[in-house]
Amino acid sequence: MDWNNKIRAARLGYILISIALCVLGIVSIAVPTLSAVLICRISGVLMILFGIIKILGYCSRDLYRLAFQHDLASGILLLALGTVMLVRTKPMVYALCTVLGIYVLGDALLKIQIAIDSKVFGLRKWWLILSAAILTGVVGFLLIFRPSESTHILMTLFGLSLLTEGILNMVTILTAVKIIRNTKPEVIDAEDYEVLE
């Protein structure tokens, strides 16, 4: 698989997982009585798939090298968390909100750094990443902080965390990842290659 195909595969994977996170988030908000065990298992599967996609993205060579710069570590973390959620589902049900909140908050902070780097690179839509990252970070913090022990409120925050995380990843991948034509070398001369939106 050449580099452009790896980038395309990682980009498509990011988009599909982001959509899945948004859908699961909306379902969690709309149906707060949904089985916590089922949500935990679905979250575990999504984490494992997203971990694989993140590692693939890290191994690709996108033009700006912004969106995937932290994805090796976060991909391995997602693989580990997803495996634990599938193997130890019942114990993880009680820790699901905290685990997701910590991950979402951490990812939001990394995306803030990506937004700042994107501004330095001259990407015009860097502020979209920043805005989505701040919103996601606030929701992740609230999920950890747990302003209420009400199941309905916790499931709403859980769903909001998944929804904002999905939107954040979608915005980041569409804004900060560019594919170039006819590239093979490691060092890219911007004058020699055409950027695809």
Image (cartoon, grey):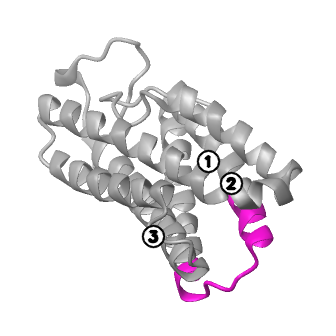
Q: How far apart are marks 1 and 2 (CA)?
A: 20 Å
Q: Contact (CB < 8 A) between labels 1 and 2?
A: no
Element class at badge 1: helix
Residue 14 screen position, x and y as percent: 51, 51
Span shown in magenta: 27-43
> Could you tell me how far apart the alpha carbons at marks 3 and 1 are, in whole angstroms?
18 Å
When asked about the image quadrant of residue 178, the answer is top left
Query: Is residue 77 at all visible to an observer of this figure?
Result: yes
Q: Is residue 110 left or right of residue 3?
A: left
Can residue 179 be seen here?
no
Q: Which mark is residue 95?
A: 2
Q: Which circle marks residue 160 in the picture?
A: 3
Neighbour tally class for label 1: few under 14, some 14-19, many 20 plus, Cα within 10 Å? many
The residue wearing badge 1 is 50
**Does the magenta portion include 31?**
yes
Q: Position of residue 62 (x, y in %)?
A: 39, 31
Mark 3: secondary structure = helix
Task: Count neighbours of disc 2 (C-alpha within 10 A) and say few if under 14, some if 14 to 19, many if 20 or more.
Answer: few
Assign the magenta stretch its main secondary structure. helix
Residue 78 is left or right of residue 176, and the answer is: right
Q: Residue at x 22, y 48 (%)?
A: 130
Q: In this view, does 17 lie above or below 6?
A: below
Q: Which of 74 and 33 is in front in this view?
A: 33
**Along the line of sight, which residue is nearer the eye, 171 or 74?**
74
Name the residue type under label 2.
Ala
Check whether the beta carbons of the residues at disc 3 and disc 1 lie within 8 A of each other. Answer: no
